[in-house]
Amino acid sequence: MLCPAVHEIMFFLFGLLFLGHNMSDKNVTTVLIWLWPFGKTYDPSLCSSLFNIDGCFITADRKHYIKSDGVVIHHRDISPDLSNLPPFKQPSFQKWIWMNFESPSHLSQLPGIENLFNLTLNYRQDADIEVPYGSIVAAEGEEDFVPPSKNKLICWIIHAYGQAFGKYTSDQDYFPTIASYDITEKLYNPLSVGTVPVVLGPSRKNYENFISRDSFIHVDDFSSPKELADYLLLLDKNEEMYLRYFEWRQHFKVKKAYFWAEHTCLACDYLRRHKEYKAFNSLDKWYWGG
Ligand SMILES: *[C@@H]1O[C@H](CO)[C@@H](O)[C@H](O)[C@H]1NC(C)=O
Ligand SMILES: *[C@@H]1O[C@H](CO)[C@@H](O)[C@H](O)[C@H]1NC(C)=O
């Protein structure tokens, strides 16, 4: 009778394996991407290598739902009748994370979502998990930045703000931010490649909370469109004046958010550091003002 011994050893080894699995899982935070943002997949496993965030298992495989510490749900991909939200009971430890990077004016309000979520993941500075579109960070080294000389063009950023944002204009601090993906891309992209954005909408002071005061042209600095146009033409001819818009690059550079891998890694990082109970019951009021 050889079998029982072998069987026992096998059983023992299997047990070890199982135990080992459990132990290594103990300090891992699982985040489930319920819907790929805009239906596009990305590599979610870069937390450690790109962002120095360890202990995260980020997946879009719904079989992990029941053990997920957080479920990230992208607003734009929720259907209007909420039929594609998780149909299962929310485990008591699990947090649902509302993720959105559209401005309220570009985003439909969905009835029924105001009391569903635990955390917000957004560009706003008062979001639980705040991810700005970009930021100005210290440049390493003394590398001189030379703007592309050929296309000395001025990049226009035009956006009719107003409307939905009107109600926020007093909450100036909420605005890294500016409006939609497009618009903010249109701010940080030209800044990073070396063109001068011409901006309007939020006040100059507000922009200056996020980007250097001499890196952009604000429409409000001029009393008429004609005056602005004249200034742009002058700038086009005057190299020295133009180059002043790039002096900030001696010490700083643009860091853009890494969509969407950074967002889900930061969600995981937040969950690891905040195990406490949290519900968010005023999503509509917070984002759309009512
Ligand atoms: C789990 O990870 C956190 C954050 O990385 C760390 O502070 C903590 O000490 C770890 N706990 C255990 C039991 O290893
Ligand atoms: C998450 O929010 C829901 C809805 O408000 C609440 O029922 C649940 O207890 C919260 N869970 C955690 C872990 O905070």
Image (cartoon, rainbow, N blue to C red):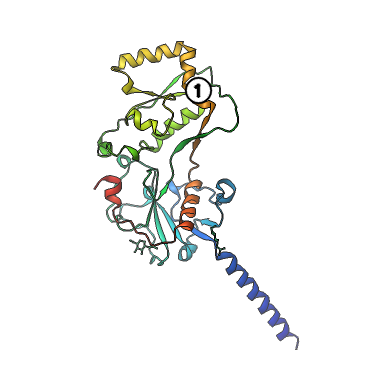
Q: Is residue 95 left or right of residue 226?
A: right
Identity, as a three-letter code, of the amino acid under mark 1: Glu
Q: Residue at x 63, y 76 (%)?
A: 15
Whether ligand 1 has any atom under 8 Å from the Cβ at mark 1 is answered as no
Give SS at disc 1: helix
| Residue 235 % position (x, y) | 43, 14
- In the displayed structure, 216 sits above or below 169; it is above
| Residue 102 % position (x, y) | 37, 42
Q: Residue at x 70, y 79 (%)?
A: 9
Which of 240/104 is in front? 240
Q: Residue at x 39, y 30 (%)?
A: 208
| Residue 120 % position (x, y) | 38, 51
According to the image, label 1 marks what residue? 247
Rate crowding at label 1 as few (under 14), some (14 to 19) or many (20 or more) other CA atoms within 10 Å.
some
- In the displayed structure, 7 sits above or below 151; it is below
Ligand 1 placement by image quarter: bottom right
Screen quadrant of the N terminus: bottom right
- In the displayed structure, 94 sits above or below 253; it is below
Which of 27/195 is in front? 27
- In the displayed structure, 205 sits above or below 164; it is above
| Residue 17 % position (x, y) | 64, 71
Mark count: 1
Extreme-bottom residue of the structure:
1
Which of 68/272 is in front? 272
